[in-house]
Amino acid sequence: MQGILLAVDLGGRMVLVEAVGTPQEYEKAFCTLRALGVEVVVSDDDYAFHSLVEGLGLDQQGCLWHAHRALGRAIGKLTRQERERWCHLILLLREKLKALPSHPPEVLFQAQALPLPPPLRWAVVYLLGLWQRLTLYHRHPGLPKTNNLTEQCICRSTLRARTVRGFKSLDGALNFFAITQALMTA
């Protein structure tokens, strides 16, 4: 199985299709994006390419939707008693994630000193580590808070890909994605 990176501009047009799977292939794809003039990447919180993006001098806007989902999953791992005990902190985390101030809220720093259950501790550390990426849109007007546009464009191709009976080669798969994206965004 081979990963395919689809890059979409803010207008919903596909600008790059690359086969990726190794760090070297990710690096090549992001170098290509940089050569195309890309300055900011909007993506989920996949750590596979954080250092590559930063190393190339690109900024990365994290997806707010993915952050909400990660927080919800962490909270879902708490026992009922833990959720009741920490309900005030959970409510504060959700409120701060919704308001998304440009700097990490003090409650995140304070929560690190508390004897939190592991899933909640993970959520606090996760949000602190991701905060600068989640709030990049404050510094780049017009930047979306989520990668929903990319997800919608990928969905168009993946829905169609499911109706074919597979691809005989990686080149065939890459061509398919490039052609369907071009037709759907024309």
Image (spheres, rainbow, N blue to C red):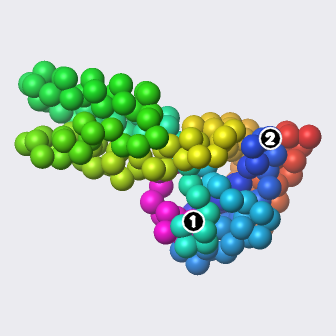
Quadrant in which the C terminus appears: top right
Q: Position of residue 9 (x, y in %)?
A: 76, 48
Magenta range is 44-53
User: Relative to residue 149, is residue 96 drawn left or right?
Assistant: left
Quadrant in which the N terminus appears: bottom right
Residue 154 in view (yes/no): yes
* Residue 46 among those drawn in magenta: yes
Residue bearing the label numbered 2: 11
Is the stretch drawn in magenta largely helix, strand or loop? Answer: helix
Q: Position of residue 135 (x, y in %)?
A: 50, 43
Chain-order first, disc 2 or disc 1: 2
Q: What is the secondary structure assignment of the residue under circle 2? A: loop
Rendered view: 108 above or below 21? above
Is label 2 in contact with label 1 (beta carbons under 8 Å)?
A: no
Cα separation, mark 2 vs mark 1, equals: 21 Å
Residue 53, numbered label: 1
User: Relative to residue 76, is residue 20 drawn left or right?
Assistant: right
Task: Depth check: give the residue in front, 29 or 95.
Answer: 95
> Which residue is drawn at the image coordinates 25% and 32% (left, top)?
75
Q: Position of residue 103 (x, y in %)?
A: 41, 43
> Which residue is drawn at the image coordinates 44% and 28% (left, top)?
99
> Which residue is drawn at the image coordinates 27% and 23% (left, top)?
91
